Image (tube, rainbow, N blue to C red):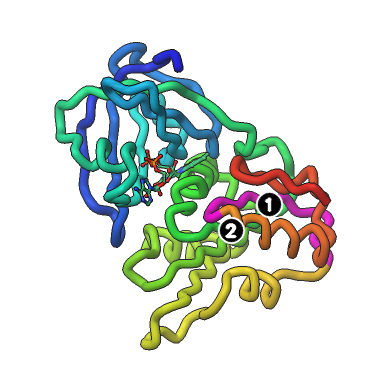
Amino acid sequence: MEVTHSGQVVYSAPISKGIILLRIKLTQPESVYFKAGQYLAVLLPDSEKASYYSIASSPNRKGEIELLVKEDKLGVGSVYLYSLKEGDSIQLHMPMGEAYLREDSDRNVIFVAGASGASYIRSMIHYLDESDHLAHREVHYFLGCREEDELLESDYMHKLAKNYTGFHYHPALSHQEDWDGHTGLITEVVDRIMPNDMSKWQAYSAGSPAMVKAVADLLIANKSLEKNYFFSDMYTPEI
Ligand SMILES: Cc1cc2nc3c(=O)[nH]c(=O)nc-3n(C[C@H](O)[C@H](O)[C@H](O)COP(=O)(O)OP(=O)(O)OC[C@H]3O[C@@H](n4cnc5c(N)ncnc54)[C@H](O)[C@@H]3O)c2cc1C
């Protein structure tokens, strides 16, 4: 795969349990044009292999990008990205993907993420916030994790929900007892909260392929979402 951009790591630190935030300053060329929700390939040194990561930062920041990388001690890409330190260089191919934010659509938005799938949603929410789109839109964000310390940027999401009457944040935990928020499968929480007629909505989802398929099945078959308005780079609905 061809290198489109070279960069230099300027920051690497944990952002939530088991996930690091890697900030990369672009050096050659010095900027990138992409749409919120797209992804890239990290080219691994001395290897033909590439690993794929959502671009987690907003496209307004053209000179640098952020990745959120889940720790996976058996994953070659994950081990490589965890080994990088400030000043190290990195080779990338970007942008890629069709599941980007349709910002010209005035449909309401539902985001559904499982664990590290929150990386894909992060870029779109930061972009909507910066572009002042949240002031006149209904946006629901469902994030399913096992435990509270895996939730990504919860303080920021709660702040958005306080500032914008149309923004709703619904974290749900599957493996924590001392938690008085939503529990159980994220699809059950979505089913309980969202209306039965979602024919005028658009949906974006990332997580395990099984979760994304379950979300698509629920929204399209049970809640009348038009299948052309379900976006995910990991799964294309067939119904
Ligand atoms: C569009 C897209 C966007 C994505 N965005 C993100 C993101 O933002 N953040 C993120 O963290 N991930 C993201 N992913 C997922 C990420 O690409 C995968 O986790 C990928 O497998 C990581 O590559 P790797 O080189 O680390 O793993 P690989 O080395 O390719 O391994 C693949 C899987 O096999 C397992 N494995 C390898 N060897 C063994 C073994 N001997 N025994 C058992 N299991 C083994 C690894 O644990 C790993 O889960 C995204 C994927 C796609 C397609």
Q: Quadrant of residue 12?
A: top left
1 in magenta: no
In the image, what residue occupies the spot 63% across and 49% down? 204
In the image, what residue occupies the spot 51% across and 49% down? 121
Q: Secondary structure at mark 2?
A: strand
Q: In the image, 31: left or right of 191?
A: left
Q: Nearer the viewer, residue 168 or 185?
A: 185
Please name the amino acid that badge 2 sits on.
Val
| Range of magenta residues | 197-208
* Residue on which disc 2 sits: 112
Contact (CB < 8 A) between labels 1 and 2? yes
Q: Is residue 239 visible?
A: yes
Q: Secondary structure at mark 1?
A: strand
| Mark sitting on residue 99 | none
Residue 104's place in the image compared with 219, above or below, is above
Q: Nearer the viewer, residue 86 or 221?
A: 221
- Of the numbered discs 1 and 2, the one sitting upstream in the chain is 2
Dot 1 crowding, Cα within 10 Å, few <14, some 14–19, many 20+: many
Q: Is residue 129 visible?
A: no
| Mark sitting on residue 203 | 1
Q: In which quadrant of this rendering is ligand 1 seen?
A: top left
Distance of label 1 from label 2 (alpha carbons): 8 Å
Which x, y percent locates residue 195? Answer: 77, 70
Q: In the image, 124: left or right of 71?
A: right
Q: Quadrant of the N terminus?
A: top left
